[in-house]
Amino acid sequence: MKIVHHGAKTGVTGSCHELIVGDNSLLVDCGLFQGKEARETLDIEFDIKNIAALLLTHSHIDHIGRLPWLLAAGFSGPIYATEATAALVPLMLEDGLKIQLGLSNKQCEAALALIHQRIRPVPYDCWAQIVLPTGELVKIRFRPAGHILGSAYIEIKLPTNEIVVFSGDLGPKNTPLLTDPIAPTVAHTLIIESTYGDKPHHQLEHRQRVLKQIIERSLQDGGAIIIPAFSVGRTQELLFDLENIIAEVDVDPNEDQTIKRVWQRLPVILDSPLAQKVTEEYRYFHELWAKEAKQRRYMGRHPLAFEQCITIDSHADHIKLVNRLQHSGEPAIIVAASGMCSGGRVVNYLKALLTDKRTDVIFAGYQAQGTTGRALVDGEKVVRIDDKVIDVAAQIHQLSGYSAHAAQEDLVSFVADIEQGPQVIKVVHGDLEAQTALANALRKVKPEATVIIAASE
Ligand SMILES: [Zn+2]
């Protein structure tokens, strides 16, 4: 058995790992290289003739984005994914291919039709069998990873009974919407992500309280509250917390009556077509929710589709709403993509409302260098959006606790909880510092394991 990393070896994008078993191999993810890791060509540069199947850990574009190019290169095997990932892949790819890569409708439809034919949804926690061309059997099992809806780590049982585990992206523990990842019982070899391998614990516990405080302070002078958010994961977590704030304020006997009235009338506007479709999938797959989220649903609440949550569909309605908020200054929360303000409908809100000092912008995620989001978080007083120079009068806030990635502590406990093994751990999907920090921490909890840093291989 041998593992070759075709992506996410020295960075966090382009995830693609090949597990070679004798004359055949399995490919785990086929993601797009993004940001500073973006490549000139998207063509698949490795030999694909022995790849028997593709396994997908989750539907983020840096894990599935090169799928159309894999198919174009002649890959004709099945594609295995959880049921929720299988539902999200077409949505995420359509958005990514058209918007980021400029593919035509026809090219997009052709790729999606092929994927639809090949995809084999497998429920969580069930072993599926893959028969290799040699007649040998490989078993695979998807287990909850707690990162986004449908995300999984994958256990692969080889014909030798050796178990190889690919972590995919792991989520933090104790998030209210998705279940926590539970470590595998046995792993002989583990390939683990390290995005936040050098980062301390996320402040998840207080995030809802802090969100409420920021919103209440922002509402004192009226105006819009803009929350730029990724369409998958972040948007749903924010809606989930906002619904809970509204529900709790409503029944709290100690809450100020004025504040109660403000919350009862406050519109929460979801203005992002992709985020809307993804939210529908989150609602459809409610069986995958964590206990707390399920309980709220059984109580008759609608954590992701509550009364005050208004969705905007057409572009014309979107523009109408931007203009209305610009002229009325009425209070409203707007959740819109993209999360780093580098595209999507949130850009129009920023162009119209950043100059108004009543406006508040709440960032709930990491902002990469060079994005409008980063400039605002850094306190720039003038930003350039679509060649328009804008004076920033709005208040900018940063909120922690909404990360979709496990921090070092979560990653270490995931590995420490493995009862048998691993003998070999390969740290991938992180920059060199994160990989090194995680590797050092893992050596302490699994002293008998050989820990390899992919970035320095
Ligand atoms: Zn991811």
Image (cartoon, rainbow, N blue to C red):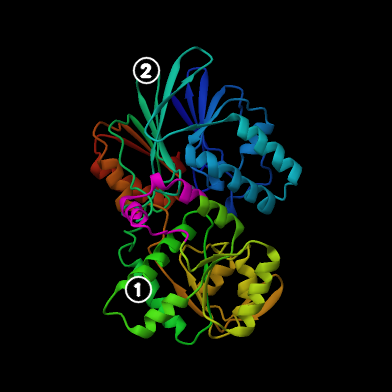
Q: In this view, does 154 lie above or below 214?
A: above
Where residue 83 appears, as percent x and y from the top left, is 48, 37
Q: Mark 1 points at which residue?
A: 250
> Where does the image place residue 292, in percent across and percent down from the top left?
31, 55
Magenta span: predominant SS is helix
Gap between marks 2 and 1, in whole Å? 59 Å
* 259 left or right of 83 in image: left
Q: Which amino acid does label 2 sit on?
A: Thr
Q: What element carries label 2?
A: loop
- 10 Å crowding of disc 1: few (<14), some (14-19), many (20+): some
Residue positioned 56% across, 47% down in the render: 61
Residue nearest the viewer, comparing 203 with 310: 310
Q: In this view, does 149 lie to the left or right of 110?
A: left
Amino acid at dot 1: Asp
> Residue 41: x, y in percent?
68, 43
Identify which residue, 291 or 189, lies in the foreground: 291
Segment colored magenta = 281-305
Q: Which of 81 and 446 is in front in this view?
A: 81
Name the residue rendered at 37%, 79% in the picture. 260
How far from the left and from the top, in percent, is residue 308?
48, 69
